[in-house]
Amino acid sequence: MHTATRDPLVDLVAAITEVRRLWESPQIRRRFTELLGRRVELSVIRTLAAVQRSTAPDPGVRDVAEALHIDNSTASRFVDQAVADGLVERSVSSVDRRRCVLTLTSKGLALLERVTLARTELMAALTAGWQDADVAVLAAGLERLAGGISALEQQP
């Protein structure tokens, strides 16, 4: 009897699809919220991370839009929410007075630190019983996949 060979790319797509579905499930979101100690919109977390990671000398809304691959109006709404929550400050650029510079507040920095700790704790629970080497292999594979996605995004 002939056994069909499984296509690893089909398996990879199926696994990523399932991981995304599960990661965004109400149960996992609830667990994350419990670990974080408060409910925070993902858009706010992504905005804070984009401001923190920006390599621009004076990061602004356009930099957030580029980092998150969204349009400027959506980035502006995200930034408005982060400012309203006291997580980001807007100031006028010393180089271009028409431009606003975004800076994380101490409250924003503290929230990002708590997010990192909550995500790490959640990931530890999800990989409980795994060997460290298996976690490292998965992390390396996902980093390579992210690099491939990034490279594909840059292509015309």
Image (cartoon, rainbow, N blue to C red):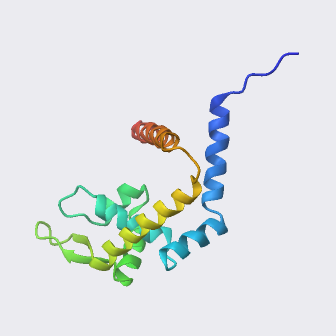
Which of the two residues, 35 or 59, is positioned nearer the viewer here? Answer: 35
Q: Position of residue 83 (x, y in %)?
A: 34, 80
Residue lying furthest right in this view?
1
At x 41%, y 64%, the residue is: 116
Q: Position of residue 127 (x, y in %)?
A: 56, 52
From what the image shows, is residue 51 above or below residue 83? above
Q: Residue at (27%, 78%) from the top-left corner?
A: 106
3 or 96: nearer the eye? Answer: 3
Horizontal side of residue 69 vs 54, given as left or right: right
Q: Taking 56 as reference, is 62 left or right?
A: right
Q: Percent x, y for residue 44?
A: 43, 71
In which quarter of the view is residue 8 placed?
top right
Instruction: Work out which quarter of the rendered image holds the C terminus and state it.
Output: top left
- On screen, residue 87 above or below 137: below
- Which residue is at the front of the view, 72 or 1? 1
Residue at image x 27%, y 58%? 54
Residue appearing at x 39%, y 83% in the figure: 85
